[in-house]
Image: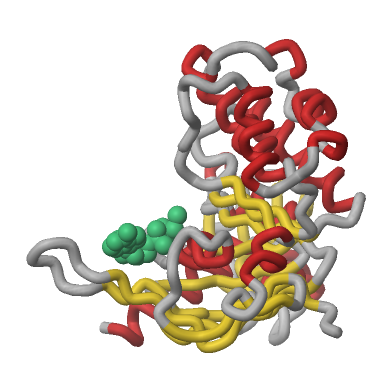
């Protein structure tokens, strides 16, 4: 038995080039485990290979090498069980315009062999806020409603794992909040969630653990908190009482940035110097302090750091 929802090892994917294009290696020897019960974020810039990885999990793209286990079932050995354990909300809208939401959910349930008596069509329509649109044609639904229907389709067979590929790219705030409310609720009820997003704030807020991939390679995988703690820079923000002096000597490993309105922002290495030392230096320089706050690093800083370093290495 395993405690992992997903176990990927040595996974590679090379797409054959169309026409005269050369083949494209989209994933390079990826190892990744995703624990059961988590909300896991797969991050990376455009073209990193996120959708390729997710589509391999979904059984939509055939891998070139490696092994994939979903809820303990090897994709190659137990394709039916591994497919039943996972539901995927794809990045692309791929709805049949001639189906109604109710019809789409029914067809999807049929594909997964869910018996009529066990279908949860009304419950799902309700959850995705389409209870009153069950009989409307998909082509008459707004973009947001169609995305919600894609979420519904991913849920018809009550999968253990729900995968969302950029679910909030280009959607309005209301839909985004609805999606996240649903995702949180499903996770609380025991579903493992895997999502890709390029909104790093969103990943920071939603995900317990994160993997960052770039150009098909895994750069790092850790808890969100530990990734953020990797960044050594914090910022002490001071609002002075009067115009601050021109010359403000600071401890080494602290750097002054003057912001508008006379605000002083001091970036410092948190392992090397302390806010106390910086405040003392400011007082010595004659700065009178009206207000103080500290800005914490964000996932964005980690991401930029890592992807930038990888670029430098590749160059
Ligand atoms: P992401 O989702 O992180 O933006 P993708 O997995 O979509 O990245 O793409 C990874 C790389 O594989 C990109 O260079 C992309 O152009 C290429 N790629 C994706 N799908 C195909 C395909 N069907 N045929 C050829 N190349 C592809
Ligand atoms: Mg993608």
Q: Is residue 147 left or right of residue 64?
A: right
Asked where in the image residue 28 lies, by quadrant, the reply is bottom left
Tell me what residue is drawn at x 57 percent, y 78 percent: 76
For ligand 1, which image quadrant applies?
Answer: bottom left
Q: Kindly tell me whether residue 250 is visible in this rendering.
A: no
**Above or below — where is 53 with respect to 115?**
below
Residue 276 x/y as whole percent: 81, 73
Q: Residue 134's quadrant in the figure?
A: top right
Which residue appears farthest toward the left when viewing the image?
Answer: 20
The quarter of the picture where the N terminus appears is bottom right
Looking at the figure, which quarter contains the C terminus? bottom left
The answer to whether residue 314 is above or below residue 233 is: below
Q: Position of residue 197 (x, y in %)?
A: 56, 53
Q: Is residue 255 visible?
A: yes
Could you tell whether 216 is left or right of 8 in the image? left
Whether residue 23 is situated above or below residue 40 in the rendered picture: below
x 31%, y 84%: residue = 314
The image position of residue 85, as x and y in percent, is: 73, 61
Give coordinates of residue 177: x percent, y percent: 72, 33
Classify residue 277 as left or right of residue 92: right
Return the residue nearer the eye: 274 or 56: 56
Q: Residue at x 47, y 29 (%)?
A: 96
**Would you identify the image quadrant in which residue 278 lies?**
bottom right
């Amino acid at each position: 038995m395993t405690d992992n929802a997903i176990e990927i090892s040595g996974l590679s994917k090379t797409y054959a080039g169309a026409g005269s294009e050369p083949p494209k290696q989209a994933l390079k020897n990826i190892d990744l485990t995703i624990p059961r019960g988590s909300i896991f974020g797969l991050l990376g810039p455009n073209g990193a290979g996120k959708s390729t990885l997710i589509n391999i999990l979904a059984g939509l793209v055939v891998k070139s090498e490696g092994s994939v286990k979903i809820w303990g079932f090897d994709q190659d050995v137990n394709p039916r069980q591994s497919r039943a354990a996972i539901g995927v909300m794809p990045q692309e809208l791929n709805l049949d315009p001639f189906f109604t939401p109710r019809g789409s959910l029914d067809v999807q349930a049929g594909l997964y062999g869910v018996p009529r008596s066990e279908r949860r069509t009304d419950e799902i329509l309700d959850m995705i806020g389409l209870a009153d649109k069950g009989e409307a044609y998909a082509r008459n639904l707004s973009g947001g409603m169609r995305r919600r229907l894609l979420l519904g389709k991913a849920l018809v067979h009550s999968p253990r794992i729900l995968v969302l590929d950029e679910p909030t790219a280009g959607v309005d705030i209301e839909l985004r909040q609805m999606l996240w409310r649903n995702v949180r609720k499903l996770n609380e009820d025991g579903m493992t969630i895997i999502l890709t997003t390029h909104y790093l704030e969103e990943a920071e807020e939603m995900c317990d653990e994160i993997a960052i991939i770039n150009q098909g390679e895994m750069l790092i995988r850790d808890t969100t908190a530990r990734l953020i703690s990797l960044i050594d820079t914090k910022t002490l923000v001071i609002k002075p009482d009067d115009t601050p002096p021109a010359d403000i000597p600071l401890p080494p490993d602290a750097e002054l940035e003057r912001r508008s309105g006379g605000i002083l922002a001091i970036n410092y290495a948190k392992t090397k110097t302390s806010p106390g030392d910086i405040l003392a230096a400011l007082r010595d320089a004659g700065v009178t302090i009206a207000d103080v706050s500290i800005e914490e690093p964000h996932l964005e800083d980690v991401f930029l750091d890592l992807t930038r370093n990888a670029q430098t290495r590749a160059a």
